[in-house]
Amino acid sequence: MTIAEKQEYLAKALRALPTAQDRLAYIVGRGRAAAPLEEGMKTDAFRLQGCLAKVWFVPAFADGRCFFRADSDSAIVKGITVLLCEFYSGQTPSEITETKPEFLEKFGITQHLTPNRRNSLVKVWSGIEGFARARLGG
């Protein structure tokens, strides 16, 4: 699935939910449904620093595409992290760097997050974008 197709799929799912609280519940549900990282991955080597919640972020690169997995001890942060990882996984580094997660704001997701949770979102996006840029050589 292309990044544009993923964005349309997500937009359709979020538009179907009438309130920002419903959209946040949808995101939390996606996080709860996601498989947790193996305990061996929940180490300082994969932990994102600067987040109030514990967030583990595991990037990988195969066949010219980036793949991301994540987990958190916070339900909302895990949901947002899983959403971003699923959205950007399987994409090329150039597709990732050309598509910022601004669509979350359009659906009222970022505006309803506490500053600490918004910070986690920024850290996860920075990890995704940084990993993709490194694969591009810049």
Image (cartoon, helix red, strand yellow):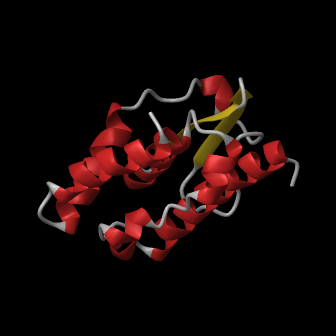
**x%, y% of residue 82?**
46, 43
Q: Residue at x 34, y 37 (%)?
A: 32
Q: Residue at x 56, y 68 (%)?
A: 119
Image: 25 above or below 111 = above
Is residue 48 in view from this perspective? no
Q: Between residues 38 and 103, which one lies in front from this camera angle?
A: 103
Left-right relation of 108 to 82: left
Count the marks. Answer: 0
Quarter of the N terminus within the rendering: top left
Left-right relation of 102 to 49: left
Left-right relation of 56 to 49: left
Q: Between residues 113 and 102, which one lies in front from this camera angle?
A: 102
Is residue 40 in view from this perspective? yes
**Residue furthest left as drawn:** 18
Left-right relation of 131 to 101: right
Q: Residue at x 80, y 42 (%)?
A: 135
Q: Residue at x 44, y 51 (%)?
A: 74
Residue 120 found in image quarter? bottom right
Image: 47 above or below 114 = above
**x%, y% of residue 43?**
71, 36
**x%, y% of residue 87?**
47, 44
**x%, y% of residue 7?**
39, 50
Residue 30 found in image quarter? top left
Quarter of the C terminus within the rendering: bottom right
